[in-house]
Amino acid sequence: MNIVRLAALAAFAFTSAVVIPASPAAPRAHHRQNGANDSGAIQAVLDAQIAAWNRGDVEGFMDGYWNSPEFIYVGNKQVTRGWQSMLDRYRQLFKSPGAGPMGTLQIDEIQISFLGKDAALVWGTYRVVNPDGKRRGGLYTLVMRRFPEGWRTVYDRTSSEQLPN
C-alpha cells in the first residue's frame, strides 16, 4: 500500500476517531479493531522513542521511523522526505555546536485507529519541557505500518508551538 493511500485512509479514520484523554502518569492508547497485541506493539515503539528522546539519543528516537527514502515528516513550515534526511535534520537541530536542547518529551494523549491489519493511524498531543523551563508542544498524527521488524512510522505530521510556562 503506498504512502499516499495510507494518508488518505488515515484522514478518513481521523474523522471518525473517539478521543480518550490520557492520565497524567503514563498515557495508554485507546484503540479500535486489531487486538491488544498490535496496540501494545505500537505503544512499545512510541515508549522506546520517548525514552530515547529523553536521554538525548537521536539515533534511538529514529528507530521508530521507517528507514526509507519514502518516509515523510511534515512540520509547521517544512516537509522532510526520507529517513536519512530526518536524522540529519535532528542532528543539526539538537547535536551540532550551538544546538538547542532536546528537552523532556511527554505524550499527553494518544489514539490508535487501525486502518487494516498492517496499518494504523496514531494521533494525540505532546509537550516538551527544556531544562530552562521553556515549553513547546502540539498535535501529532502518525501513519504506522507493520514491517517484518515491527511497527514503524511511515508518515509523521507534527505541529509545534511555544506553550506558556
Image: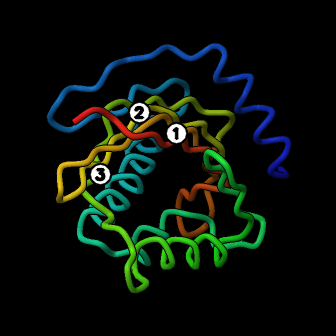
Secondary structure found at label 2? strand
> Which residue occupies the foreground of this view, 98 or 55?
98
At x 60%, y 36%, the residue is: 121
Around disc 1, counting alpha carbons within 10 Å, would you say few (fewer than 14), some (14 to 19), or many (20 or more)?
many
Say whether marks 2 and 3 touch (CB < 8 Å).
no
What residue did someone put label 3 on?
Answer: 105
Compared to 92, does 148 lie above or below? above
Task: State which tag comes first along the sequence, 2 or 1.
Answer: 2
**Disc 1 marks which amino acid?**
Tyr
Task: State how far apart marks 2 and 1 are (Cα).
Answer: 6 Å
> Which residue occupies the foreground of this view, 161 or 119?
161
Q: Quadrant of the C terminus?
A: top left
**Disc 3 marks which amino acid?**
Leu
**Left or right placement of residue 51 versus residue 78 in this view:** left
Q: Quadrant of residue 71?
A: bottom right
**Left or right placement of residue 81 versus residue 67 in this view:** right
**Left or right placement of residue 59 versus residue 103 in this view:** right
x, y percent for residue 84: 64, 78
Q: Quadrant of residue 27?
A: top left
At x 57%, y 38%, the residue is: 141
Say whether marks 2 and 1 touch (CB < 8 Å).
yes
**Disc 2 marks which amino acid?**
Thr
What residue did someone put label 2 on?
Answer: 125
